Image (cartoon, rainbow, N blue to C red):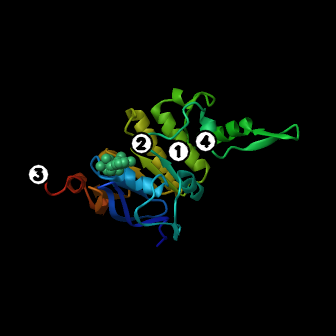
């Protein structure tokens, strides 16, 4: 059996007296899509922020490629190949799609043999290539990201991850703000990532989306992991039951 790309062990994070992530352990294997589910406030976003270097854990370990890592910043996580699309999308609104794909990793070329300047032509060519490869249509690559639709922005984030050979893709509610056709496109891109061997952790409110894309589901409630199921071995009712807990009668 392949070794996990990511393991977290007993991760723990509190904000003052509130325990947001309570001793959570989980693994992610190459090429699998893991759905992370739970009610509002369950700790899903905080958990992924511990894995992507936004928050430092107060306890527990993050093991990436069999090595324990300390992720001091999102940039450090990205250097390891952990790409994250946050609920509040982290693209630069005023830059265009190709600049966003190369954000923080811009190629430079010599100008007049002296000065180094941004090689925008190269960035545009490469961006065209990767977007085409993923069958993503962006009408004008020079338009600022803020003028693109929600789905196109998601697509640009995914293109960036694929271009830079992400080892793990994390998506927090990627389809929440999208229309139906765009949701389908994002789900299709998640499958493309999986086919390319890139594992994905996807947080979603939409159980249907999760059942359509995930191989495995991890359920959180009040900071704790309360269940883990292979898609083939569970159903909507069981998952909703885990999300809301046995104290609630449906
Ligand atoms: N930066 C923060 N400061 C204080 N409390 C936070 C912070 N981020 C999240 N929380 C709290 O931690 C709990 C888990 O939040 P979150 O991880 O966003 O849940 P989810 O993504 O599952 O809805 C919530 O009670 C939330 O209010
Ligand atoms: Mg959240």
Q: Earlier in the sequence, mark 4 or mark 1?
A: 4
Disc number lying in front (2 or 3): 2
Which one is earlier in the sequence, the residue at label 2 or at label 3?
Answer: 2
Tell me the mark number nearer the camera, choosing from 4 and 1: 4
Which numbered disc flags the more N-terminal residue, 1 or 2?
2
Where is mark 2, residue-wise? 87
The residue lying at 43 percent from left, 44 percent from top is 187
Q: CA distance from mark 2 to mark 3?
A: 30 Å
Q: Quadrant of residue 123?
A: top right
For the point 32% across and 52% down, which residue is it? 37
Q: Position of residue 115 (x, y in %)?
A: 83, 39
Earlier residue among tags 1 and 3: 1
Circles 4 and 3, Cβ within 8 Å, touching? The answer is: no
Q: Of callouts 4 and 3, which one flags the residue occurring earlier in the amino acid sequence?
A: 4
Q: Secondary structure at mark 1?
A: helix
The answer to whether marks 2 and 3 mark residues whose Cβ atoms lie closer than 8 Å is no
Q: Few, some or many C-alpha atoms within 10 Å of disc 1 (few <14, some 14-19, many ≥20)? A: many
Q: How much space separates mark 4 and mark 3, taking CA atoms?
A: 47 Å
Label 2 beta carbon less than 8 Å to ligand 2:
yes
The residue pinned by badge 4 equals 101
Q: Which residue is mark 3?
A: 249
Circle 1 residue: 158
Looking at the image, is mark 4 or mark 2 earlier in the sequence?
2
Q: State how far apart marks 1 and 3 are (Cα).
A: 39 Å
């Amino acid at each position: 059996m392949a070794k996990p790309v990511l393991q977290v062990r007993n991760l723990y994070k509190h904000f003052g007296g509130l325990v947001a992530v309570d001793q959570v352990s989980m693994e992610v294997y190459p090429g699998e899509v893991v759905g992370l589910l739970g009610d509002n406030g369950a700790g899903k976003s905080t958990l992924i922020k511990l894995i992507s270097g936004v928050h430092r854990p107060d306890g527990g370990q993050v093991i990436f490629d069999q090595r324990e890592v300390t992720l001091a910043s999102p940039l450090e996580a990205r250097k390891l190949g952990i790409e994250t699309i946050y609920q509040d999308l982290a693209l630069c609104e005023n830059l265009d799609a190709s600049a966003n794909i190369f954000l923080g990793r811009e190629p430079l070329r010599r100008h007049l043999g002296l000065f180094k300047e941004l090689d925008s032509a190269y960035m545009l060519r490469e961006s065209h290539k990767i977007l085409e490869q993923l069958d993503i249509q962006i009408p004008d690559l020079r338009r600022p990201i803020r003028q693109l639709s929600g789905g196109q922005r998601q697509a640009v984030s995914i293109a960036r991850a694929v271009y830079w050979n992400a080892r793990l893709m994390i998506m927090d509610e990627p389809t929440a703000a999208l229309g139906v056709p765009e949701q389908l496109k994002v789900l299709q891109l998640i499958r493309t990532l999986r086919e390319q061997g890139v594992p994905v952790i996807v947080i979603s409110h939409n159980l249907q989306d999760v059942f359509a894309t995930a191989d495995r589901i991890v359920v959180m409630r009040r900071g704790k992991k309360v269940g883990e199921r292979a898609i083939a071995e569970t159903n909507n009712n069981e998952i909703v039951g885990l999300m809301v807990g046995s104290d609630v009668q449906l």
